[in-house]
Image (cartoon, grey):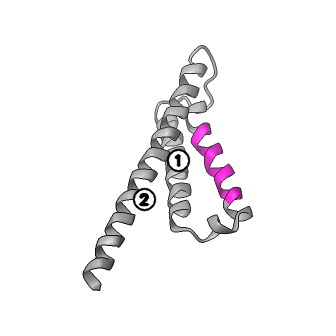
Amino acid sequence: MSCYTVPALAAIIHFFMRKKIPSFRNDKYHRLLNQLLLGGAVFGVVDHLWNGEIFLFGDKLLLDLLLGVTITVVIFLVAGVMMIFDNASEKKHFKTEN
C-alpha cells in the first residue's frame, strides 16, 4: 500500500512548500515537480487497484515502502534532468535570437 503513499506525501508536502515559499510559488520547475509527484502517486493507486491490493498490509509492507521511496527519488531525478535540458534549450534559443 505504501508504494503510492510516499510520492503522494511528497506531492502534498511540496504543494504546501510552494504556498509558503515565495520563490517556489510561480516557478515552472516546482509546478512540474509537483505534477510529476502527483502522477507517480496516481500511477501507484491505479496499479494497486488493478491488482486488488489497494489497502494491503502485511509482510510486503517494507518492500512496498522501499518501492515508493525509489519511485519518488526517480521522479526527483527525472525532474532534475528535465530542468537541465530545459535550461540548456532556453540558453541555446537565447543565443540564436541575439
Name the spot of residue 25 as percent of width and height, x first: 64, 68
* Gap in angstroms between the C-alphas marked 2 and 1: 22 Å
Q: Which mark is residue 83?
A: 2
Q: Residue at x 60, y 38 (%)?
A: 6
Query: Residue type at mark 2?
Result: Met
Q: Quadrant of residue 92?
A: bottom left
| Side of 82 relative to 21 (left or right) | left
Q: Residue at x 71, y 57 (%)?
A: 16
Q: Residue at x 60, y 13 (%)?
A: 59
Q: Which mark is residue 92?
A: none
Number of other residues with Cα within 10 Å of mark 2, as a class: few under 14, some 14 to 19, many 20 or more = some
Direction right: furthest residue: 20
Above or below for 76 versus 59: below
Name the spot of residue 77 as percent of width and height, x first: 44, 45
Closest to the observer, 69 or 40: 69
Instruction: State which tag comes first along the sequence, 2 or 1.
Output: 1
Direction left: furthest residue: 96
Q: Residue at x 51, y 67 (%)?
A: 28
Above or below for 41 versus 53: below
Closest to the observer, 46 or 75: 75
Pointer 1 residue: 42
Number of other residues with Cα within 10 Å of mark 1, as a class: few under 14, some 14 to 19, many 20 or more = some
Q: Secondary structure at mark 2?
A: helix
Task: Judge depth for marks 2 and 1 and give the one in front.
Answer: 2
Query: Could you tell me what secondary structure mostly forms the magenta stretch?
Result: helix
Query: Residue type at mark 1?
Result: Val
Name the spot of residue 21 as percent of width and height, x first: 70, 63
| Magenta region | 5-17
- Residue 7 sits inside the magenta stretch: yes
- Residue 50 sits inside the magenta stretch: no
Which quadrant, please, contains the N terminus?
Answer: top right
Above or below for 51 versus 75: above
